Image (cartoon, rainbow, N blue to C red):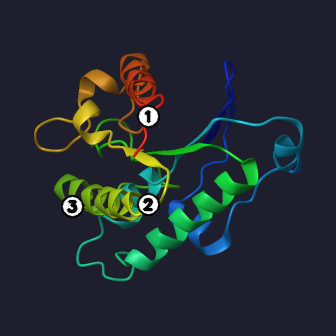
Amino acid sequence: MVTATPNHEDICIWLGPRLAFSVARDGWRLPSVVRLIPRIRRFNKLIIVLGEIDCRVYLGRPNDTDYRQESWVREFVDAAYSLAGRFHVKELVFLSPVPPSDIGRNRKEFPRTGSLNARVQGTKWFTDRLISLVSTRPFGDVIDLRPLLGTDDGAFDPKFTTDGVHANVQGSLLISEAIRGREGVAK
């Protein structure tokens, strides 16, 4: 999901389900109407929410070395900064993937792969790479959702989800507060 925020209005564009890995490989596949937005309006902030499927399906695989390559995370970050440039935004914010969970049904199209602990470690791996890569850029920030929505063992706290994949209303409010708390925060 990509959210662009002008002065007092939000535009939220659901692009999914998409993987951060596929954005790294293929770039953004934006609907044509979205490509027109920068011509009509300028935004202060671009918020990018991707990576949960990468962590749930691929980064939890036992002994996986193919997917745990920093190069694709770097290409994902590069693609996000390129999109931010196209939208002429002043601030780019990444939301980390939500913590993994065994709550809810296991979807066959995007199944939970590996143990919960392996997915917790995969989420940590991805988020740590994202934080590291964004920290070297002139603007941008990562909001790490693990301490907001997770339990001590790194899993999705059941108080903040009903399906184990998405934040519920209470979790969404915490995320909104975290975003608002970063308003105007410069590196």
Q: Quadrant of residue 119?
A: bottom left
Measuring from the top left, give residue 149's x and y in whole percent: 28, 32
In the displayed structure, 80 sits above or below 95; it is: below
Secondary structure under tag 1 reads: loop
Q: Taking 83 as reference, is 40 left or right?
A: right
> Residue at label 3?
118
For the residue pair 147 and 166, the one nearer the viewer reads as 147
> Residue at label 2?
54
Measuring from the top left, give residue 109's x and y in whole percent: 53, 55
Measuring from the top left, give residue 169's x and y in whole percent: 43, 17
Graded by Cα atoms within 10 Å as few (under 14), some (14 to 19) or many (20 or more), the crowding at tag 2 reads many
Graded by Cα atoms within 10 Å as few (under 14), some (14 to 19) or many (20 or more), the crowding at tag 1 reads some
Amino acid type, callout 3: Ala
Q: Taking 111 as reference, is 37 left or right?
A: right
Say which quadrant the N terminus sits in.
top right
Are dots 2 and 1 in contact, CB under 8 Å? no
**Residue 182 appears anywhere in the view:** yes
Tell me what residue is drawn at x 45 percent, y 23 percent: 180
For the residue pair 147 and 140, the one nearer the viewer reads as 140
